[in-house]
Amino acid sequence: MAVREDLLAAGLAVFDRDGFEGATVAAIRTRARASNGSFFHFFGSKKELAGTLFLEVLQHYHAAVLAAIDAPCSAQEGIGRLIRAHLDWVVNSRREARYLFEISRSEWTEEVRDAQRTQNSRLAEGVERWRAPLIARGELLPMSSTLFFSQIVGPAQIFCRAWLSGRDRSDPRLQADILIACAIRALVAPQAIQQTGGTP
């Protein structure tokens, strides 16, 4: 399976350098030092490799997010951990993050749509395991998991996308404290904020 992993790593590098349209199977094979036969043994096309790569990168991202709330933590602490996990992953895995958030296109992932849904469901379940007891205790405001996650990731993505595209050179992690403070005000019940003095 080392050849498959080499091809995926080469695909990521070539897509990052040339974009999807500019990338060629030949360039990916050359970077991976793989034969034409090896490429087509694992992937039917450049698009199929792109979809598979999307799933792998998505899995790495989800693992980083879920690791942040693996240990028990309060509503405010968990929000802080989730936002920092997102920012850290983007900065520390820049090429993967750029692929996931800037380069990938929905039409590449048609063939892996069911697997993508499964991965997204696992992420939602993991977040809910932490979130549901806090909603039940009145610490977190009740809302759909989609709306909750949009408040965690959405504002941070404005800074991350600007950094990934090169429009802004400043490290998006510099915005972590204010992003966390804003998310706490949006997601934590007012009485829970008052009890802790508003600090995570």
Image (cartoon, grey):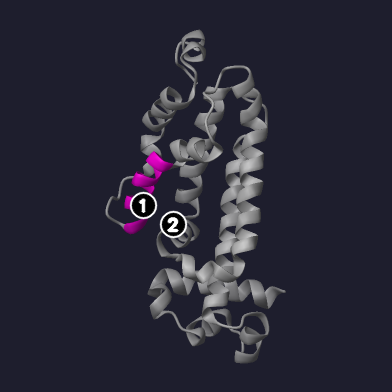
Residue 84 visible in image = no
Q: Where is residue 14 shown, x and y percent of the image?
A: 46, 74
Would you name the residue on which mark 2 appears? 101
Residue shown at 65% from the left, 61% from the top: 115
Q: Please, what secondary structure does the residue beneath circle 2 have?
A: helix
- Give the side of residue 46 with respect to residue 56, left or right: left
* Image: 139 above or below 78: above
Instruction: Answer whether residue 84 is magenta in the image.
Output: no
In terms of image quadrants, where is residue 33? Answer: bottom right
Span highlighted in magenta in the image:
154-165
Instruction: Work out whether residue 44 or residue 181 is closer to the camera in this orientation and state it.
Output: 44
- Give the side of residue 63 with respect to residue 104, left or right: right
In terms of image quadrants, where is residue 131? Answer: top right
Q: Where is residue 17 shown, x and y percent of the image?
A: 40, 72
Instruction: Work out whether residue 169 or residue 132 is closer to the camera in this orientation and state it.
Output: 132
Label number found at residue 161: 1
Q: Please, what secondary structure does the residue beneath circle 1 have?
A: helix
Instruction: Work out whether residue 13 or residue 178 is closer to the camera in this orientation and state it.
Output: 178
What amino acid type is highlighted by mark number 2? Phe
Marks 2 & 1, CB-CB < 8 Å contact? yes
Q: Main secondary structure of the magenta part?
A: helix
Residue shown at 48% from the left, 59% from the top: 100
- Report the residue that reaches farthest toward the top: 195
In terms of image quadrants, where is residue 70? Answer: top right
Residue shown at 44% from the left, 57% from the top: 101
Crowding at dot 1, Cα within 10 Å, few <14 / some 14-19 / many 20+, comes out as: some
* C-alpha separation, residue under disc 2 versus residue under disc 1: 7 Å
* Image: 73 above or below 83: above
- Give the side of residue 127 with respect to residue 17, left or right: right
* Image: 60 above or below 82: below
What amino acid type is highlighted by mark number 1? Arg
